[in-house]
Image (cartoon, rainbow, N blue to C red):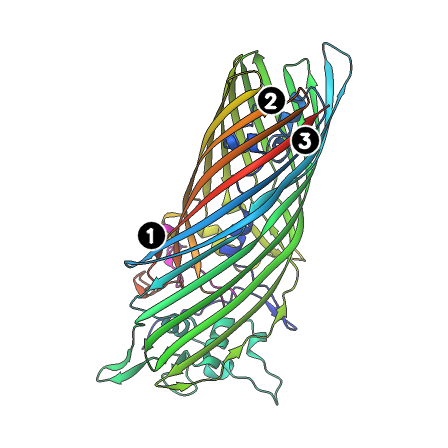
Amino acid sequence: MKRITCLFISAFFLAGGVAYAQGEMDAYRLSQTDLNGTARYLGMSGAFGALGGDISSMSTNPAGLGIYRSSEVVTTISLSTSKANTNWNGFKADASKTKFNFDNIAYVGYFPTGNDEGLVGWNLGISYNRVKSFNRSYRMNGAQAYSLADYVADLTYGIKEGNLIYDKNGGYDPYNNPDVPWLSTLGYEAGFFDPYEKGGSEYHSAFGKQGANGWEADSPQNADLLVNEKGSIGQYNISFATNISDRFFLGATVAITDLDFSMTTKYTEDFSVMSQLWLDNGLSTDGTGYAFNIGAIVRPVDFLRVGVAYNSPTWYKLTDYFSGTAQTTINNQAWDAVSTPEYQAGDYHLRTPDRWIFSVAGVGQNFLISADYELTNYKRMNLNDLDGYELNQQKDIDSDFGMSGTLKVGAEYKVTPQFSVRAGTLWRTSPMKKHMKDGISPVVGGEYLKDAVGVVGTIPNYTIDKGTNSYSIGLGYRFTPNFYTDIACVYREYKEDAYAFPSTFLPDGTSFVKSDPASLKTKTTQVALTLGYKF
């Protein structure tokens, strides 16, 4: 197999047993937020950018706190059920997970000045809000022409076999070689692939036979991938807002963010009753970050409000814990299971993208309607080390991501002074560029890249965002002038393409190892209950 040499540049740095295990898809996962907040906020799909008067405004447009005319304490709990359905070349699989959540708790203090004009009052808000839940399980089961062994063999193309082998006497560890991907080392030790010539740098899948025209690789008869994700992103906010002449409302938030994410994956391929491949992985990420939000709401006339807000990036300092285990059985001969060293990855920085929120709302005597549009440029995600140097996978972010837009529309109607009904909807577009959605090679500098997605560590599976829709309804009841409760139900559908491993491409852009996507739909139903007290 002769090809133009196109060495895979490792997407992580290794130094003294330390690895950066973050890739472009990990950065994207950790940069997203959910529709989350109080039950009233959820019932209107979060369209509160110009309305305010809800503690969830601290995480979006803090000028909304200036609408408050009393102090308040509030808390929200919820129950969510996530069901994931996949269709992989006609083979369907399902998985589900149910989770009870403590979503938020907050205090808003109102301090009037006694003035009718100018500075009428100011507000202080302190809150905890869970802005992202990672809890999900999904499974894909089916068959495709190419194996993970084919992918890892091509991933290792151009690397001398000797660089994959431990040299205990010489102190050489391939996991500490920045030019050798971890998946290449693990796959070599587990017997995923073999060199065409001993000591060479070209490889083929170990599953197959020698034919008249060379090595004939087998296709897996069945493949199965099970992914379990859990964790959350919590945000602690301190907000200030002012009311100027009941016409202009200004606000700012300082946020401290706590991130906790973990994922386990189990992947197997069956070639026959006598040959099998399996790969298990674990990844956990934790860390803290900080951000700020600023915003304004203008009420030119009594029935109209217009809002604008800027949400800064979140600047994270993160740490990964990472491990992988692999094994093969070929012609009824089992290799020993092998594992990566379980390193604590070195600390690194992630900067999420910033976003702009533009809002408008109409307010009547017994009803209101509101719309928000959020604009986020995911190309502005950034991964760098503690010295500020960009990691190699930054080039993947630059070539694979673009803009995402989110439209929220919500309405509320007061049936009686005590009882309200609400409804809303949300549409979010994917920031993935066309070549990512189509599963083709990206073009950078007029040349096709070898890999569809750069793999970091030994986790080859990933998903491609295809967009999100959600629909919500809610009810609110005020028992007394001070005490109230709200309830909301939100149905979300998140569409993705799920891959067991990336495709690889020849220099002319044609596929060399083709990985077929499974259609993945994650349907989440969330029921939230908020209790509030005004004083």
- The residue carrying mark 3 is 252
Q: Is residue 276 above or below residue 104?
A: below
Amino acid type, label 3: Ala
Residue 418 coordinates in the image, percent (x, y) = 58, 19
Residue 507 coordinates in the image, percent (x, y) = 34, 64
- The residue carrying mark 1 is 438
| Numbered disc 3: secondary structure | strand
Amino acid type, label 1: Asp
Residue at left offset 38%, top offset 66%: 224
Amino acid type, label 2: Ile
Residue 263 makes an appearance in the image: yes
Residue 71 coordinates in the image, percent (x, y) = 72, 25
| Numbered disc 1: secondary structure | helix
* Residue 1 within the magenta-colored segment of the rendering: no
Q: Is residue 517 above or below residue 129?
A: below
Of 106 and 376, the residue lying toward us:
106
- Magenta extent: 437-459
